[in-house]
Image (cartoon, helix red, strand yellow):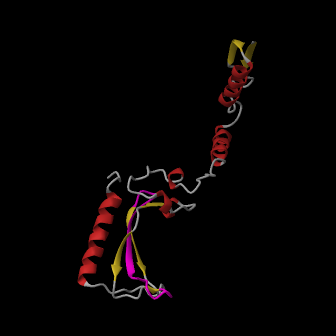
Amino acid sequence: MTTATFKCEHCGDEMGAVNLDDGEYYDLAEKWDEDHAHCGKSVELTTWQALVKEGTSRRIVHGYDASKVIPIPRPSWSDPDRDILSSALTSCCYRSPIAAVAVTHARGWEYDDQETVVHAAIDVSAKLFGNGVAMVGMTINKAKAPETGVSATPDEARRIARAMLAAADLAESEVAR
């Protein structure tokens, strides 16, 4: 057991402690040093040193989990395998699974086996970005990707519209308004 007296030479504060084990002594000494680190220094220097110390914790190891980067709780509808991660919150987002609506009058894919055809589609998903902005993502998924236009039958257009409306409602469902 250790008995200790701490005294700050700058502000004159004193503290005594008795019967401390080694761990308690080191914890108390560390706390004392933190509490009196500003003594004898200008307010400006103390403020600057605090900012420097805060800035050293800017690295985040996320393990491909957006919830470790985004300060908004993960929505129940999000699919962790579809998280988008970036160094900017406005580029990070939670995403829902895709609702793919086939568009049969756009070129899809034909496979060499000549038994398989995959229709082009409009892929729709709900998104919640790291800055709290809810969005609806829409991707035209067809064989000639550089072309962005696609035609849909009236029935397909209605299904795309339902998917877009549902994604919009879903994206906003767990956002505080």
Whole-percent x and y of residue 68? Answer: 53, 50
Residue 83 seen anywhere in this rendered image of the structure: no
User: Magenta residues?
Assistant: 111-133
Q: Does residue 126 belong to the magenta stretch?
A: yes
Quadrant in the picture for the N terminus: top right
Residue 77: quarter of image = bottom left
Whole-percent x and y of residue 164? Answer: 31, 70
Rendered view: 168 above or below 102: above
Q: How many marks?
A: 0
Rendered view: 63 above or below 124: above
Whole-percent x and y of residue 110? Answer: 45, 87
Q: Residue at coordinates 28% horizontally, 67% vertically from top-left?
A: 165
Q: Does residue 87 belong to the magenta stretch?
A: no
Whole-percent x and y of residue 19? Answer: 71, 11
Residue nearest the observer in this picture, 147 or 86: 147
Residue 12: quarter of image = top right
Q: Is residue 172 left or right of residue 19?
A: left
Residue 82 seen anywhere in this rendered image of the structure: yes
